[in-house]
Image (tube, grey):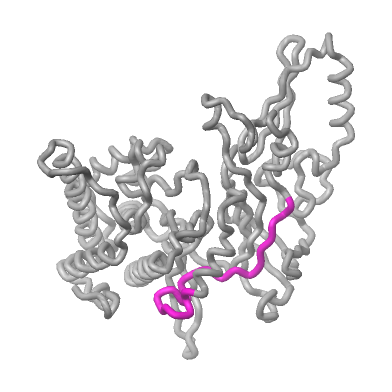
Amino acid sequence: MTHAMSLLIVDDVAWLWWYDRQGAIQSTGVDIVKDLPRFLVLLLAMQRFSPEDWRVNPTLGGAHPDPIEPGSALPADPLTLANNDGQVITLQLIEDILLRVRLRGRATRVIRALSPSPHPFTMVSLEGRPLVVKLSYPEEQRQSEVKILQVAQKAAMANADIEGHIPEVIFACDLGYSTGTIRDELGELWLAPDAAVPACLGTIFRPARVLRLIVFEELEPIVSRSGQDFLTAWVECVKCHYALWAAGVEHSDPSLDNLMVRVTRAPDGAEVVSGIMNDWDLANLRGISQHTGLERTGTLPFQALELLTDEYWRGEVERLYRHDLEALIWILPWVFLRMKGERTVTNPPLEAWQTDNHRTCYMEKLVFLGNMPDYSASPSWNLEWKWGGRLLIWLDDEQRRRQKLLRDVWDGEESGQLEKEPDNWDAEYQKFWKVYKYAATRASLYYLVALIPPWIKV
């Protein structure tokens, strides 16, 4: 469903409302008694709407005459899709893996699929290979996830920390729908970007969104692994994330859902598990990407403390590498304290982190940091929790150090003003591994020590 329409009638006046992933549009009111001809023209026009006019995407939904509810049955027949590069793929959609019902935003939907087609690039048959189809509405002016992964793949050719640790794109295409189309047609009536927008209304403008389809290999959630396999995959994601950040590809949204594993077989039949840094649709290509900044990236339960502030949500705090690194660390207590395999334990702690209020999440995390000894991991994560707890203590110490520096400048104990913090990812990465090694040694997790990059001096 690309959009929705409704009529709101109050007494003798009717308003037409249009809703899509960019927001809502309300018409001026039509008096259905005094201006009956105009209202009848509206009804006659709607009577002649095609299924596409009524919000059914012709590529995905076919000529279905009736409204389809979110989560309804997927098309029974295979879909054949083509993109602007001349690539063609046939897909059989099987079942939803992820369905986020949202009024606005990306509204990502992930569907398990199979294909009898050859791979569009390698021409090797895809038959029997598990695939996923990602449908979403990204901002039109953002770099596409496919473009970002192409840049990442080039970087991988010279860096083993990236190679094999990013998802493989099988096929991609835009499905011919943009939320900007109707707003362009309305022009100044919609307060378009080049219109004279009153200052009090300027903040309502949001970028247009396009409906995009990407086919990936199917990966497994990182929580499908436990113990050494889980932490090895987590470390591989940390390494991949850093290497790409240093290469100019900034992920900007590390979260538990975005860490995956690829499971393959070695020549001797042994299982090989590789950590995959997934979901790059909110990433930035440093010096290339252009977006408004109105959409603050990040997943609240894993967001860095400094990004859970009003300043960040007003667009006054620049996201740095250390913020993403902190998000990767916040994943650890979430897993150690709440997860048993892929399932969440009964009455899990940290539930208050799952909020849409950044201030609430900030305060809850501060309370957690002050009371960490009161939290116990499941027996299978005891040693790992001791190690992860020391990483969190380091985050807390760093946060307090920065706050003290701010107070000293404000109080006049330090001369001058606090300069804008440079994004020194190399220094932050080095500091992380120093604390990482200390914590792993104290917890007797020597396999973690063995995963430290050989070029890191700790």
Residue, far bottom: 268
Residue 146 location, x and y as percent? Answer: 59, 64
Residue depicted at 88% across the width and 21% down the height? 40
Residue depicted at 80% across the width and 40% down the height? 53
Residue 276 location, x and y as percent? Answer: 46, 68
Tell which of 237 and 130 is nearer to you.
237
The reply, left or right, for residue 39 in relation to residue 433 is right
| Residue 172 sits inside the magenta stretch | yes
Q: How many marks?
A: 0
Residue depicted at 36% across the width and 70% down the height? 239
Res 381 → quadrant: bottom left
Res 192 → quadrant: top right
Residue 6 visible? The answer is: yes
Residue, far front: 416
Which quarter of the figure is the C terminus placed in? bottom left
The reply, left or right, for residue 370 in relation to residue 51 is left
Stretch of the chain drawn in magenta:
155-176
Looking at the image, residue 296 lies above or below residue 9: below
| Residue 89 sits inside the magenta stretch | no
Tell which of 16 and 127 is nearer to you.
16
Residue depicted at 66% across the width and 43% down the height? 70
Tell which of 192 and 53 is nearer to you.
192
Residue 351 visible? The answer is: no
Res 403 → quadrant: top left
Residue 351 location, x and y as percent? Answer: 36, 42
Which quarter of the figure is the N terminus placed in? top right
Tell which of 36 and 56 is nearer to you.
36
Residue 96 location, x and y as percent? Answer: 62, 54
